[in-house]
Image: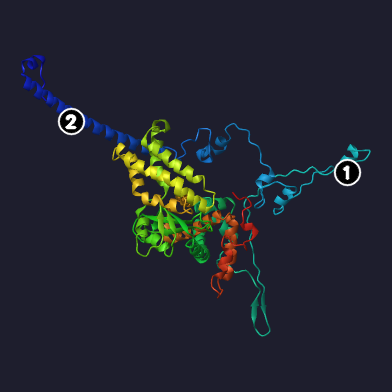
Amino acid sequence: MEKFSAEQLNKMDKESVVEALLAYQKQYESMEKQLASMEKHISILTEQISLLTTRKFGRSTEKNLVTADQVTIYDCGFNEAEALIQGQTINEPEIETVIVAEHKRRKHKGKRAEDLSGFPVKEIEHALSEEELAETFPEGYTRLPDEVYKKLEMHPATFEVLEHHIAVYKGKNGKVVKANHPKEMINNSIATPSLVSAIINAKYVNAVPLYRQEQEYQRNDINISRQVMANWMILVAERYISLVYDRLKEELKTSHVIHADETPVTVVKDGRDGLHKNYMWVYRSGDMCRAKPVVLYDYQRTRKADAPDAFLTGFDGKLVCDGYQVYHTLENKADTRFEVAGCWAHARRKFADVVKSAGKSAAKGTVAGEAVARIGKIYDSDREYISRSPSARKKHRETEVRKLVEQFFEWARTAIFTVPPSSATAKAFQYCLNQEKYLKVFLTDPSIPMDNNIAERAIRPFCVGKKNWNIIATMNGAEASAILYSIVETAKANNLNIYQYFKYLLTEIPKHMDDTAGTDFISDLLPWSKTLPDECHKKIVK
């Protein structure tokens, strides 16, 4: 735009000056709009950079009030032992706290003997010789009760070859009879229930991949290749453990509430060229409806609706899940009988990410911070009645909790216009408003929790495990992993000793493979069966 000197302005008439001023004002307003737009764009980019930095390098927890002195094992990394101690004086645990009898909590007289009654005890005698006694007590002595203290000894893995000798008899009439002997789990194999259960426990409980187990066995002079171990996993999963899986699936569908989630996994040989993203789905019975705890994994090649549609056929309760559209599509099908309930943890997380990336102090007074606080109040109110009767919890939700929920959505419909449309905060608001119908379902049913955290916890062991082995070689391996993870997580939920439970299953199921009566025997092998041996139950129940 043309610039005017003071002399030129003095010579200009009034109309020309006004015209010039209006032109300058118009240009100024245009520049203000451009500047505001640039500031919004910079704000969005800054937010995105902060979010990406937090996701890459920050902590994943949403607990904003954790202080530096609240160290957990997950913060310690390589220096776990040193980090956990940090100069503290650590008291050694008593033997009673290390070995706890099943469902026993209170101390009472004779508790130590009761606690240790099921464990082998090796008595070590410390006494003076006759010569030492005579020298120490020339006038004679009386022996008092022994002073007794206990230590806990640990024996590394030991191996024993079981050589079966089967007596063979031949009658004078030529008839040949063999003595009764246990049914082999895998014919012509050195595998035993104890060995295979130990491998399952290491891989599917402790996330130790097979190649590391192979190395550990070699250090103990046992040569079992990872390929052999993988073959054992697939065989026992398909042949035996799948029978328990199928029965648990029937049980799961009788639950009033099922939680669902999914996570990607790479499978090399899935019938397509190259590496492709496959999916492991998880389904978990609801805790608040007091159903028998069941956790089932389901391997599928895709994330499409076909996977949960096939698995949930016949289910007519409430499905708690995140905002993935596939679940909502299924709910709207004509033959679907279940109702979808949303997850408040997912709604909160989107705001919490913004708060974490900005920092607690900077987030104070922001709409994202207020959203986190409002959702927190909903959680706090609902948690007050979490242990009450279903009728009391339902009444509280319909009155007190509903007020907070309605206030949140009313506020959200206005607050969304106070932030840039493309910002993470705006997207968080949009998610909540899109999911409003599903986020309100828990208000009408006391057996539905506010979130889907129980499913996320159920699938986490698989997510931890896949960080160690990264990919699955074959579809058979993926399906076997789904079956074995299912039994592991269901056993955990029922407070079982996982190694002992698998050992029991792999000992008992082969005995019934030739039965003509079908699979009715599986009922006695389910995780909550009263006929399970004592060693299958954990003595320490958390």
| Camera sees residue 386 | yes
Residue positioned 51% across, 58% down in the render = 294
Residue positioned 51% across, 41% down in the render = 74
Q: Is residue 212 above or below residue 516?
A: above
- Give the amino acid at mark 1: Glu
- Give the amino acid at mark 2: Ser
Please provide percent x and percent y for residue 309. 39, 62
Image side of residue 101 versus residue 31, left or right: right
Image side of residue 415 versus residue 31, left or right: right
Q: Secondary structure at mark 1?
A: helix
Distance from Cα at disc 2 to Cα at disc 1: 108 Å
Q: Which residue is mark 2?
A: 30
Q: Is residue 24 above or below residue 399?
A: above
As drawn, the label of residue 370 is none
Please provide percent x and percent y for residue 59. 45, 38
Q: Nearer the viewer, residue 42 or 215?
A: 42
Q: Secondary structure at mark 2?
A: helix
Q: Quadrant of the N terminus?
A: top left
| Res 314 → quadrant | bottom left
Image side of residue 326 versus residue 292, left or right: left
Q: Which residue is mark 1?
A: 130
| Chain-order first, disc 2 or disc 1 | 2
